[in-house]
Amino acid sequence: MKNLFGNIFGSKTEKQPEPLSDETLEKIISEIKAETSVPCMRLVLKDGTPSLTASKLGGLPYIPHDGALPLDAQNNQLKLLAQINCANLSGLQGFPERGLLQFFIATNRLFGLSTASPTEQTGFALRYYETIDETVTEDEVKAKTAEPDDSVKIRTPLVNEPLSIEFEADTDYISAGDFRFEKLLIKKAEALCPNCGVKSLFDLTEEQQQKLAAEFQGKGSKIFGFPHFAQDDPRGIADKGLEGFDTLLLQHDSDGENIDWGDGGTGCFFIEKTALSVCSFSKVLYNWDCY
């Protein structure tokens, strides 16, 4: 009878989880930052007139003599979002040491995003040229660029272009929006406070959740490091099969002046580390979201 009543009404002696202290949370934050710290390059936008082969935001892309601008599914030319001269990032291990890496997106309402097929390069495209032909001229590239159709509304996250891109070496650590963050948090909480019963972010107080969001924002424009999301990390959706895109190839963040993804959002490109190691850019995950 005693066990029956205990099952129905709950045992008075059942031990309740103890709250996670702010001191323990600080230890968790410190350990997560230390364990996930990786090199990255921050993008710094500068006014000026970047050359055809320079690192830049928007503007005119380099196209070899026998090349053409990539097209979307409706055969419209894609627009250059960013061009990276890899020689500018010679100190970033794992990134191509030379050549040009280009990111193109469509100029439709969703900037070429397809949530159903985010890795199919129909609304976006990457181009990598290992060698640069310095005899290519701007006039030659302009001749390959179609005149805008006044009847079609051009939509782009680029507010101000072209801009030169400079790079600053930095370190980054996992962001709270990264699909791997919560699992890491739980592991740390169980190790440092096994009686706290932390099984998700929602087992923390609202103030503690806000502190984690502030400490692990992931914001900023960068190459490598960890992403920022206004919504959810698409790599965490179980049936999408996107968890293998483990490397942030490029993140462009809204800055309120030069680039704006919808309502202050962020645009990201991810690649598998093994594909990047052989400079294969045919399989890339493109995502942007906003608030």
Image (cartoon, rainbow, N blue to C red):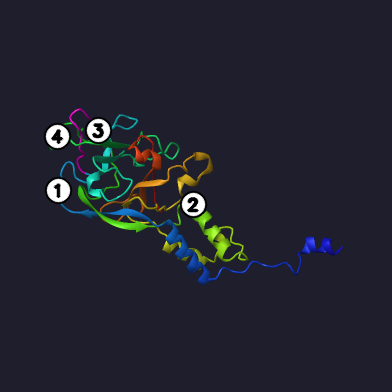
In this figure, which residue is indicated by the disc labeled 3? 69
In this figure, which residue is indicated by the disc labeled 4? 136
Count residues near mark 1 (Cα–Cα under 10 Å), then give few for <14, some for 14-19, many for 20+. few
Measuring from the top left, give residue 118's x and y in whole percent. 41, 39
In this figure, which residue is indicated by the disc labeled 1? 49
Measuring from the top left, give residue 99's x and y in whole percent. 23, 40
Chain part drawn in magenta = 59-68
In this figure, which residue is indicated by the disc labeled 2? 180
Q: Are marks 1 and 4 in contact (CB under 8 Å)?
A: no
Return the residue nearer the eye: 137 or 96: 96
Q: Are marks 2 and 1 in contact (CB under 8 Å)?
A: no
Identity of the residue drawn at 30% across and 47% down:
157
Count residues near mark 2 (Cα–Cα under 10 Å), then give few for <14, some for 14-19, many for 20+. some
Q: Nearer the viewer, mark 1 or mark 4?
A: 4
- Marks 2 and 3 sit apart, C-alpha to C-alpha, by 36 Å
- Marks 1 and 4 sit apart, C-alpha to C-alpha, by 17 Å
- In the rendered image of this protein, does residue 82 appear above or below residue 283? below
- Marks 4 and 2 sit apart, C-alpha to C-alpha, by 44 Å
